Amino acid sequence: MIESVLNYDHMGIMLALAMLIIGSMIDIWKREIHDFYWIGFGIVGFLLIFINSDLLPYLLNIGIALIIAPFVIFIWKIGLFGGADAFALIALAVIAPMATFSENPVTPFSTLSNAAVLFIIPFIVNIMRNLIAIIKHENIFEGFEENKFKKICAMLIGYRAKNPKFCFSLEKLENGKRKLNFTIHHAENEEYCTTPNTWITPGIPYLLLITGGFILQLFSGDLLLSLIIR
C-alpha cells in the first residue's frame, strides 16, 4: 500500500511538471494553448488515482484542491490572466493536489500564492532595464510631460521598447500629447502593441510563474502562509 501511494504521488508530480514545463514552452512560442491540452492532462491525472486500492482519500484531496477552480475562473473572466493559466491550475488540482516534499503547509492556493511572490521578478527586471538606459544617458521619457510618481510607476511595470513584441502599450494620446496610461489590460482580449519606440508593459506568460510557483511548493511549501504562521 505504501509503495502504491508513493508511486501515485511521484507519478502525479512528474505528470504535473511535464504538463507545466511543456505548456510554458508552448505559451512562450505561440502565446496560445488549446483547452484540449489541459483536459487531456487532467483526465490522465484523474485516472492515476485508480492505481490505488483505497480511492476515497485521493478523491477527497482532489475535491478539496478543486476549491481553487471558481476563484481562478473569476480571475480569468475579469482578465487578470488567461484561460490557459486558469485551466492549468484546475488540471494541477486534479493531477497533484497540494503536492509537496516540504514540511511547510500547503493549500489549494499555494501554487498561485507562490506565483504571486515570483511576480516581483518582472518588476526588478524592469527597474534594472530602465536604470541601465538612464546610465547610458537615454531620455526614456522624451516627449512626455508627467509627474515623478507616474514616471516611477512606469519604470516599475514597463520600459520604452524600440521594437515591441508580445507587449501592451503604456501610452495614449491626449490632446495631441503623449501620456502614460496605466489602464489594466485584459489578458485575452487586448491587442499586442507593435508601435516602435513606445512605453510598454511586457505580456509575461503567467504560466511560467505558475510553473515556478509549483516547483517552490514542492520544495518550500506555501511561502506566504509559512511566513504568516511563523
Image (spheres, rainbow, N blue to C red):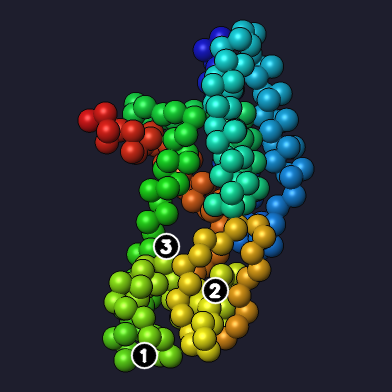
User: Marks 1 and 3: in contact by CB < 8 Å?
Assistant: no
**Taking 206 as reference, is 146 above or below it?**
below
Q: Position of residue 118 (x, y in %)?
A: 40, 51
Which amino acid lies under the numbered mark 2 shown in the image of this protein? Ser
Depth check, front residue: 113 or 72: 72
Proximity of marks 2 and 1: CB atoms separated by less than 8 Å: no
Q: Position of residue 112 (x, y in %)?
A: 48, 41
Q: Characterize the local packing of mark 1: few (<14), some (14-19) or many (20 or more) Cα atoms within 10 angstroms.
A: few
The disc, 2 or 1, on the residue closer to the chain's N-terminal end is 1
Q: Give the image quarter of residue 72.
A: top right
In the image: residue 65, left or right of residue 149:
right
Question: As shown in the figure, which amino acid type bears the numbered disc 3?
Answer: Pro
Query: Which badge, 3 or 1, comes first in the chain's sequence?
Result: 3
Q: Which mark is residue 122?
A: 3
- What's the residue at 54%, 74% (across, down)? 169
Question: Which of the labelled discs sits on residue 169, or is there none?
Answer: 2
Q: Which residue is mark 1?
A: 138
Q: Position of residue 122 (x, y in %)?
A: 42, 62
Q: Quadrant of residue 193?
A: bottom right
Q: Residues within 10 Å of mark 3 (few under 14, many from 20)?
A: some
Report if residue 62 is visible in the image: yes
Q: Residue at x 60, y 58 (%)?
A: 186
Q: Does 176 sit left or right of 29 as displayed?
A: left
Of residues 176 and 85, the one nearer the viewer is 176
Which structural element holds mark 1?
A: loop
The amino acid sitting under disc 1 is: Glu
Give the mark, 2 or 3, whose residue is nearer the N terminus: 3
Rendered image: mark on residue 96: none
Q: Quadrant of the C terminus?
A: top left
